[in-house]
Image (cartoon, coloured by chain):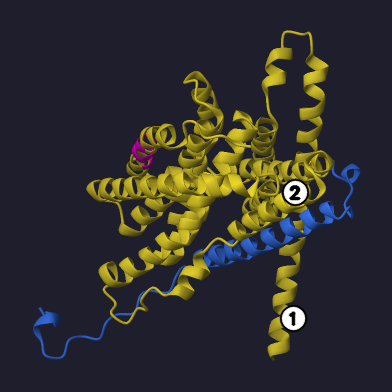
């Protein structure tokens, strides 16, 4: 009997696995096209009217635009939902970030940790409680308030997923929050590097501003890559610090909802095990890669290590492209239409506050910071 | 109308509702992807540093 059930389950999952693999194939094909365009368009348009623009366009732009175009085509063909199991933005971005760790000297992480933690603690607290308060004033459901506040103040979709588990949110609320994160992140990828350049911000300050503001980690990497290598490194350290604090917020939300909202005295109190369960493990991979990379460079010398670390960086770029293509492919508009204007207003207000407080903190904490 | 707080035998606390299965699945997938990304990233790094994955193989 149980064998029958497992056989039925296996038959049921096979097509899903096949569709997910087809989805991965779509992501890889679009990533290959991104790489091709990124490498050939600047050379092909050199000396023409488009040459200047083509030279300024970085790979995240091609990847996201191709992802969005693929999204439209797959939706028209009725294949988008079936293939969506292969659009693994979280996996691709986290693998890319672990690889990025290898190119960051561990001393830089240690030096940046103090200001990054200070910025993360202040920003998360200010933006989270503002969003929670404004959501309450506008009469939003407590669970939706928790999801929006976590997403906008910590790290976008990962935070929304963790908060959804913590507060027992509904699937629609999670889908809605995830869509909102992407709607706000997409323009930020292009606007924040432009604004940082217009404001004349130094690379580390620009990176800290980008890392502290853009919600979702993949979009932070995209904007950081556009702003420059130093900006990308600092943006990643700042965002990774926020990711690391996700576990603390998720556990605090679990406790708050259990005691204050559900009023369930039997609910388990937050424990160290829960904290570990919610901790984003890729942060450990990022730190380990930085230690390994630093030891390697020290052992073989920086000139011998340069081409090898260059290969690691090429691999990192490859995974970031896969993640950016997936962002475009995963984007959904429908959940936004269903939720009305109030959550959008809350999210937009919180984003503006995040921008202003984040800029002040980035200038205060990262002016004069040097990346080796 | 009853007020559970006013009685000697208050109503047993209500357990929290079961999480939405889709939300639970998203959370599980996110945790698994965390470990998968960490392992894949570190394995690729070691392969490159030891020369088992040469630069010309990376597009």
Counting from the top left corner in percent of width and height, residue A84 is at 66, 53
Q: Quick check: do tags 1 and 2 share a chain?
A: yes
Please report the residue visible at 70 percent of the width from the left and 54 percent of the height from the top: A86
Quadrant in which the C terminus of chain A is drawn:
top right
Q: Is residue B25 above or below residue A97?
A: below
Label number found at residue A7:
1
Label number found at residue A115:
none
The total number of labels drawn is: 2
Q: Residues within 10 Å of mark 2 (few under 14, many from 20)?
A: few
**Which residue matches tag 2?**
A298
Please report the residue visible at 61 percent of the width from the left and 40 percent of the height from the top: A233
Which one is in front, A255 or A360? A360
Protein chain holding label 1:
A
Q: Which residues are magenta?
A: A347-353
Q: SS class of the residue under badge 1? A: helix
Apparent colour of chain A = yellow
Counting from the top left corner in percent of width and height, residue A352 is at 37, 34
Counting from the top left corner in percent of width and height, residue A124 is at 38, 49
The quadrant holding residue A344 is top left
Membership of A349 in magenta stretch: yes
Q: SS class of the residue under badge 2? A: helix
- Locate residue A67 relative to residue A217 in the image: left or right: right
Please report the residue visible at 51 percent of the width from the left and 36 percent of the height from the top: A210
Is the stretch drawn in magenta largely helix, strand or loop?
helix
Apparent colour of chain B = blue
Q: Is residue A82 visible?
A: no
């Amino acid at each position: 009997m149980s064998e029958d059930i497992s056989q039925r389950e296996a038959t049921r999952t096979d097509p899903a696995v096949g569709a997910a693999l087809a989805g991965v194939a779509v992501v890889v094909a679009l990533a290959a096209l991104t790489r091709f365009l990124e490498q050939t368009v600047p050379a092909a348009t050199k000396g023409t009217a488009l040459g200047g623009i083509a030279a300024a366009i970085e790979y995240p732009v091609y990847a996201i635009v191709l992802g969005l175009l693929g999204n439209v085509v797959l939706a028209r063909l009725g294949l988008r939902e079936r293939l969506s199991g292969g659009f693994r933005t979280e996996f691709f971005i986290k693998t890319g970030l672990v690889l990025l760790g290898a190119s960051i000297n561990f001393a830089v992480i240690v030096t940046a940790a103090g200001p990054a933690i200070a910025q993360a603690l202040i920003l998360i607290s200010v933006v989270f409680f503002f969003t929670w308060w404004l959501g309450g004033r506008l009469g939003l459901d407590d669970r939706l308030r928790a999801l929006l506040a976590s997403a906008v103040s910590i790290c976008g979709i990962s935070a929304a997923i963790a908060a959804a588990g913590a507060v027992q949110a509904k699937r629609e609320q999670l889908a809605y929050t995830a869509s909102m994160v992407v709607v706000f992140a997409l323009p930020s990828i292009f606007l924040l590097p432009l604004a940082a350049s217009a404001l004349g911000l130094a690379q580390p300050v620009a990176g800290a501003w980008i890392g502290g503001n853009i919600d979702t980690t993949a979009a932070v990497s995209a904007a950081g890559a556009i702003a420059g290598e130093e900006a990308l490194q600092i943006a990643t350290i700042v965002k990774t610090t926020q990711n690391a604090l996700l576990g603390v917020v998720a556990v605090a939300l679990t406790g708050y909802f259990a005691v204050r909202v559900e009023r369930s005295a039997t609910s388990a109190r937050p424990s160290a095990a829960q904290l570990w369960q919610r901790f984003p493990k890729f942060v450990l991979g990022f730190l380990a890669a930085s230690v390994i990379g630093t030891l390697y460079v020290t052992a073989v010398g920086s000139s011998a290590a340069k081409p090898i670390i260059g290969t690691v960086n090429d691999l990192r770029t490859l995974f970031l492209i896969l993640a950016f293509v997936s962002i475009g492919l995963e984007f959904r508009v429908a959940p936004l239409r269903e939720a009305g204007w109030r959550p959008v207003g809350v999210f937009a207000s919180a984003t503006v506050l995040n921008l202003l407080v984040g800029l002040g903190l980035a200038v205060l904490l990262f002016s004069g910071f040097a990346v080796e | 109308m009853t007020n559970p707080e006013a009685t000697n035998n208050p109503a047993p606390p209500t357990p929290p509702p079961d999480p939405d299965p889709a939300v639970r699945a998203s959370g599980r997938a996110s945790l698994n992807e965390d470990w998968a990304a960490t392992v894949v990233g570190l394995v690729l790094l070691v392969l490159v540093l030891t020369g088992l994955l040469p630069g010309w193989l990376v597009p």
